[in-house]
Image: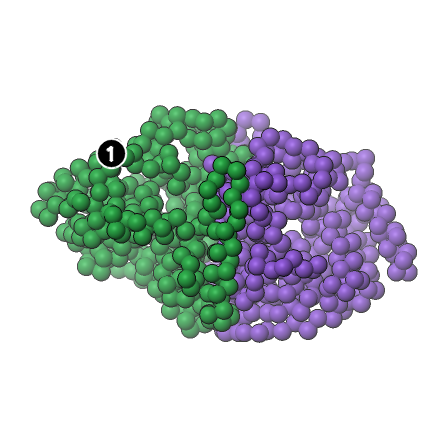
Chain colours: A green, B purple
Amino acid sequence: MLDRFKVPKEDQVKVSESALRKAVQDIFEKIGLSKEDAKNGTDVLVTADLRGVETHGVSNMLRVYVQLFEDGDLNKTPNIQVVKESPGTATIDADRALGIMAGVQAMEMAISKARDVGVGVVTMFNSGHMGAVGHFSMMAAQKDMVGMCSVAAGTGILPTFGAEPRLGTNPISIASPSNLEAPILFDAATSAVAGNKLKLAARVDATLLPGWVASSDGSPIMEETKIVDRDDYYQLPLGGSREQGSHKGYGFGLMVEILGSLLSGDDPGMLRDTPSWTPSRSYFAAYNVDAFTDIDDYKKNMDDMLVTLKSTPPAPGHDRVLYPGLSESEEMAKRKVSGIPLHKEVIEWFSETTQRLELQELELI
Amino acid sequence: MLDRFKVPKEDQVKVSESALRKAVQDIFEKIGLSKEDAKNGTDVLVTADLRGVETHGVSNMLRVYVQLFEDGDLNKTPNIQVVKESPGTATIDADRALGIMAGVQAMEMAISKARDVGVGVVTMFNSGHMGAVGHFSMMAAQKDMVGMCSVAAGTGILPTFGAEPRLGTNPISIASPSNLEAPILFDAATSAVAGNKLKLAARVDATLLPGWVASSDGSPIMEETKIVDRDDYYQLPLGGSREQGSHKGYGFGLMVEILGSLLSGDDPGMLRDTPSWTPSRSYFAAYNVDAFTDIDDYKKNMDDMLVTLKSTPPAPGHDRVLYPGLSESEEMAKRKVSGIPLHKEVIEWFSETTQRLELQELELI
């Protein structure tokens, strides 16, 4: 993440991984989720915080999820069902489960199919928010498979040349196993910036850069902009303007609609009357490396590539070249030792919530 | 394509689709390719020209291919072999076949596997140039499947923050069946612009826009630039600079290295000593729609989405909103009737080549 999105030092309060896991799991269980769902959901959220992906961690998401469960918009006891299946594929109705929980089941199914026929693809409709989709891709990587996950949700992104939004931020992720090097984990919205980053920018008082948003008539704003009301802007696809390649970001966004929405048999967001609760449509793929090539050779080759990337001479003004997932792995190693910095406002929410639900308070470092 | 890349009117000479097909196929056969390979290769090239994708059509590519065959860098009679296989996957050694021919076989195999187990994924190494990769995705769409194809080749693209290039332009494509509407066909380099566009810009005397290239120390050039020597610049990933999202273009480029190079058991380009002839590593996927959901519902849903996209109100300064593949389908309908405009320099090449190979001359309109 760019520095502008990080929690300012003076607003940070630190908690340990284990304390955060305990508090989040307690909350999920107390509001009525199964122990397994609570555990899986906690893992998705806390892993995001450990990796420094605050947009998709506890701070930004947990309070929203709890609210949606308590309002009955999300189903605490979903009956997740396979509606169509073949040896390499399945389509799942998530029955309004929260995506960070249902997604774990979907990727487990894709992995199992990949073990049988070399590749497994699962599409899922009718779920809640999917969190950091890279989490599911990483599940496959941990089983010596290449994992991919993408999610179609929302309709806040303009198509290139358009004056009305049509697409979700539609993130795509891929993860791969490696041997000695930190695994590659790419996870990016196909919009110029993730939707959560606009909220986060408002919270940390940051500006938006050229090509991130358009004014309400659809014209890309190509100067740095102070965000006042998030609703005054439409989000642009990756690239920003046509000349800078926004038609590619738009195309990647549509790719996600095809793989998630259409292939799951569900409507893309743009064909729905906006409901109070908009379900996500997701795509999960697992490629069993061993079905394609020798897994040990693959990992060796991957390590060589990652070393080559990170030892690339940097351009003026930069310390080093990264690859997707490298700095997040380093951050995780640090935060596992020295704790996770949360915004003091998030700590207040925990305090109120644990009190209200009669739970043990979140322990601070 | 942006207007700046089109052949200027005064340099255009028109030929009919059938005349162009005949001339190209004659040349391929005369230099020693099988009738089937010549036919498949001709189809990939001429379809690109019909769709208005000049960068990957006859003009830019045929002379290069002929040269590579005649120099012995490409194999005219390849022994294409499956080196590893499972019910849903295969890895193919293309034996230095030209990719626009070998790719047809690879995608046919993916389609056949998708018919059996719902999804088919084929990786291929050791082939020549793949042409417009969307062609292979479209083969699946014509069989009521979602098709994807991506190709890792070359090492001309900088990683974000890097001063030395590491990745190929690594295009990704997806195509989907539809019912009444022109099918969606997205096909884009993960670099800011396709490599061929730089050559084309030099030929048509066009400038490069901000964020397309970097100077030789890796610094992104953020002003409009007149291209003098193509070798003075490195290409940037989609996004251009980090602030504009180049880390996402870089990530998509790496995705293609994983799916093509690594999964096919081959080295990514960055790990090779630069050979005179650099083989491509490709990824082909076919998703049998009927394995996921009802195909008729799917196509109806797709049509509804495409109509919604193209009827989106346009932003100021634009006539209409497109979706990937729409204007190319329209162009194809026009060119099938009124012919394909080639640059006069390309016509000269045809004239010399047909004379040299003692073939009938390319017929002009």
Report the residue at 58% width, 48% height from top.
B165
Looking at the image, is B127 positioned above or below residue B305?
Answer: below
Drawn side of residue B313 relative to residue B94, left or right: left
The residue closer to the viewer here, B313 or A69, is A69
Report the residue at 81% width, 35% height from top.
B10
Which quadrant of the structure image shows residue A177? bottom left
Residue A136, how many percent across, how many down?
A: 36, 57
Q: How many marks?
A: 1
Residue B33, how many percent across, how many down?
A: 77, 67
Q: In the rendered structure, which amino acid carries the disc numbered 1?
A: Asp
Which quadrant of the structure image shows residue B264? bottom right
Residue A40, how many percent across, how many down?
A: 26, 57
Residue A315, how many percent across, how many down?
A: 53, 41
The residue closer to the viewer here, B24 or B293, is B24
User: In which quadrant will I find the N terminus of chain B?
Assistant: top right
Q: Which residue is mark 1?
A: A11
Drawn side of residue B93 relative to residue A33, left or right: right
Q: Chain of mark 1?
A: A
Drawn side of residue A176 relative to residue B182, left or right: left
Residue B305 visible in image: no
The residue closer to the viewer here, B243 or A276, is B243
Looking at the image, is B73 positioned above or below residue A252?
Answer: below
Neighbour class for label 1 at 10 Å: few (<14), some, many (≥20)?
few
Report the residue at 59% width, 73% height from top.
B82
Drawn side of residue B182 relative to residue B204, left or right: left
Residue A4 visible in image: yes
Report the residue at 25% width, 45% height from top.
A340
Looking at the image, is A141 positioned above or below residue B348?
Answer: below
